[in-house]
Image: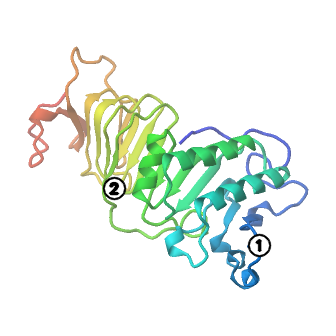
């Protein structure tokens, strides 16, 4: 799985638990964004993509969350929705359906396999902000989109499959994904989730977090929350050039930084030893024998 962890505010219309007003079945309410009519094209009625909901931009309420689902990547669709069309359609739909959407409800963007750059993510965020809908997190199966979103300061979850969000079923267990490299500093409120190893070339500030099913490497200052081996792997490790985390988690083990910080910081590795999570000086750490390094 780049999250603003804010909660929905109570307003009119659906309550903060996503319950509909006046008996509207909001959980099954989908706002479908139709493409522009094809002027002068007599075959438009036969070829228009709105006949297939998977080719449309959709708003959907699922388990109290508001999801914004994008159509598949243009190269994988017979009737592609290209970026400018998508942006204009989203803008029109938000302008015409604000009465159905509770202001200040966080939006989870389900980008699927659509490739997004930082500017496109920011444009989607700006359109949602005009409707008082904050962008909370981005889910994508594209590595480039995950990196772009995280670099721009958004919470992101990068996965191979997205079946558990927006499709009403749990994703099956799959092999660990390739490492996710992020060359950015994670600010407060940002969360990165990934089904593999995460490497951050930058700082992890207080209030931010990284959750990985593999190892976590921070080439900078670690002062936020990190969870390696999130799927339960106790062999995973956490390494940072400056280890001062708010909280460390490996598999089901939890630890915090010592109350008395060291006089001088140096690269360190956190791992699970016989007595729980231990922290070793990186230069003394031996992968072949976890019991031998000098621990602090």
34 or 1, nearer to the observer:
34
Which percent across, then down, holds residue 25?
82, 63
Task: Name which residue lies at 44% across and 39% down.
Answer: 209
Which percent across, then down, holds residue 250?
33, 45
User: Which is nearer the N-term, disc 2 or disc 1?
Assistant: 1
**Vertical comparison of 164 with 293: above or below:** below
Task: Name which residue lies at 44% across and 41% down.
Answer: 151
Which of the two marks, 2 or 1, is nearer to us in this view? 1
Displayed quadrant of residue 196: bottom left
Task: Name which residue lies at 38% across and 33% down.
Answer: 204
**Vertical comparison of 191 with 295: above or below:** below
Task: Name which residue lies at 61% across and 52% down.
Answer: 108
Identify the residue under disc 1: 39
In the figure, is residue 162 to the left or right of 54? left
Q: Residue furthest front?
A: 40
The answer to whether mark 2 and mark 1 are in CB contact below 8 A is no
**Vertical comparison of 201 with 144: above or below:** above
Q: Residue furthest right?
A: 22
Label 1 environment density (alpha carbons within 10 Å; few <14, some 14–19, many ≥20): few
Which percent across, then down, holds residue 229?
33, 51
Displayed quadrant of residue 272: top left
203 or 143, nearer to the observer:
143
Displayed quadrant of residue 221: top left
In the figure, is residue 31 to the left or right of 191? right
Identify the residue under disc 2: 196
């Amino acid at each position: 799985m780049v999250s603003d962890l804010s909660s929905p505010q109570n307003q009119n219309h659906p309550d903060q638990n996503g319950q509909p007003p006046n008996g509207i079945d909001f959980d099954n309410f989908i706002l479908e964004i139709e493409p522009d009519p094809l002027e002068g094209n007599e075959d438009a009625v036969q070829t228009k993509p709105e006949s297939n909901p998977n080719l449309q931009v959709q708003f959907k309420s699922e388990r109290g969350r508001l999801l914004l689902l994008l159509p598949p990547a243009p190269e994988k669709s017979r009737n592609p929705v290209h970026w400018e069309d998508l942006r204009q359609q989203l803008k029109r739909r938000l302008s015409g359906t604000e009465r159905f959407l509770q202001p200040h409800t966080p939006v989870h963007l389900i980008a699927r396999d659509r490739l997004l750059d930082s500017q496109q993510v920011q444009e989607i965020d700006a359109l949602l902000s005009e409707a008082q809908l904050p962008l909370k997190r981005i889910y994508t199966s594209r590595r480039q989109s995950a990196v772009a979103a995280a670099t721009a300061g958004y919470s992101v979850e990068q996965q191979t499959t997205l079946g558990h969000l927006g499709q009403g079923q749990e994703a099956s267990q799959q092999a660990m994904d390739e490492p996710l490299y992020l060359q950015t500093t994670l600010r407060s409120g940002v969360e990165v989730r990934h089904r593999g190893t995460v490497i951050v070339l930058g700082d992890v500030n207080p209030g931010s977090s990284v959750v990985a099913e593999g190892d976590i490497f921070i080439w900078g200052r670690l002062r936020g929350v990190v969870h390696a081996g999130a799927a339960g792997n106790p062999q995973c490790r956490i390494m940072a050039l400056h280890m001062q985390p708010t909280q460390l988690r490996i598999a089901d083990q939890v630890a915090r930084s010592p109350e008395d910080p060291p006089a001088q910081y140096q690269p360190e590795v956190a791992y699970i030893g016989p007595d729980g999570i231990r922290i070793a000086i990186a230069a003394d750490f031996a992968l072949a024998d976890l019991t031998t390094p000098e621990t602090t």
